[in-house]
Image (cartoon, rainbow, N blue to C red):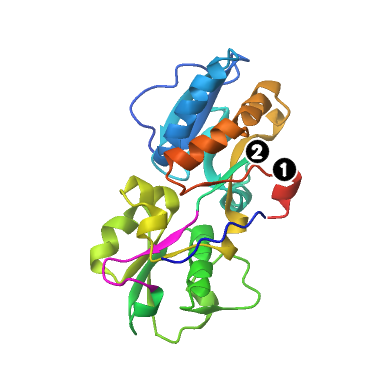
Amino acid sequence: MKKLFLTLTSLITAGTILTACGGDDDTVTVGVNGSGVPVWEYMKDKAAEEDITIDIVEFADYVRPNQALADGEIDINAFQTVSYFDHFKEQHNLDLVPIGATYLAPMGLYSDKHDSPEDIPEGATITIDQEETNQGRALLLLEEAGLIGLADDFEGVGGPEYITENPLGLEFEQIQAAHAPRALPDVDAAVINNGVAREAGFSPLEDAIYIEGATADPYINIIAAQAERQDDETLLRVVELYQQEDVENYLLEAYNQSLIPMFVSLEELQDY
């Protein structure tokens, strides 16, 4: 198990959104994916003490939460890295902004067949996410693990075409992020998102044969809102409640140290 370097640096599930977004200043509807539900259940109880009602809407993919936010179906979402967010909103021309940082969820390399990256043989097959930003993140992880080399001008978005060194002749299979755990028996290794890994029953710090370290900083997770509501007092109060010590402790305990709280300022977030 590699040491984790702690650098400071759609389908909606059964149910209907009960409260119209924007219709009640003290109600905030948040869109999350499955792995994000527990902390927002905690936040729901915490916000209620200040008479803020949080309604949680769970999404089964990584596309609908941003579209739903842009369409006003939800007030905020909390499921994505700042890197993915910037790329997605540019591609889809969405007027969304980050309003707070939450945590870092290190990506890992997993294998049913090998105990470390050094054990991966010539011609091995490794799965990577087919989405560009997560795919680029996976390649950075594999470079950090010593398996490949990347072009000097690689900025974290793109695929195998940026690989300049592949001494083992590795093959890369591009799949949907959620399918990676099920692919493990059929490949040598899989790069799996933190949330997907935890939903599949893995403990990233214990089960990954290599976990993201120094390359992780651009992938801090965020809370996002519509640009026109970035100064909304209730939304910003929710961010403030999130970025407190009790939530930090909850994240560390509930997620078995697999999430690293990163409550950096919006100014610092821009540097990533």
Q: Magenta region's main secondary structure? A: loop
Q: Is residue 210 above or below residue 45?
A: below
Q: Which residues are magenta?
A: 106-116
Residue extending farthest to the left is 185
Gap between marks 1 and 2, in whole Å? 6 Å
**Residue 206 figure quarter:** bottom left
> Which residue is at 40% across, 74% downward?
117
Q: Is residue 71 visible?
A: no
Instruction: Verify CB contact (< 8 Å) between mark 1 and mark 2.
Output: yes
Which element type, helix, strand or loop, lies under badge 2? Answer: strand
> Of the residues shown, which amino acid type is indicated by label 2?
Gly
Which quadrant does the N terminus fall into? bottom left
Q: Is residue 88 above or below residue 135?
A: above
Task: Determine which of the numbered discs, if any, sits on residue 266 in the image.
Answer: 1
Bin the neighbour count of mark 2 within 10 Å (Cα to Cα): few under 14, some 14-19, many 20 and up. many
**Residue 240 figure quarter:** top right
Mark 2 highlights which residue?
Answer: 100
Which quadrant does the C terminus fall into? bottom right
> Which residue is at 46% across, 78% downward?
147
Whether 264 is among the magenta residues is no
> Which residue is at 46% across, 83% downward?
166
Which element type, helix, strand or loop, lies under badge 1? Answer: helix
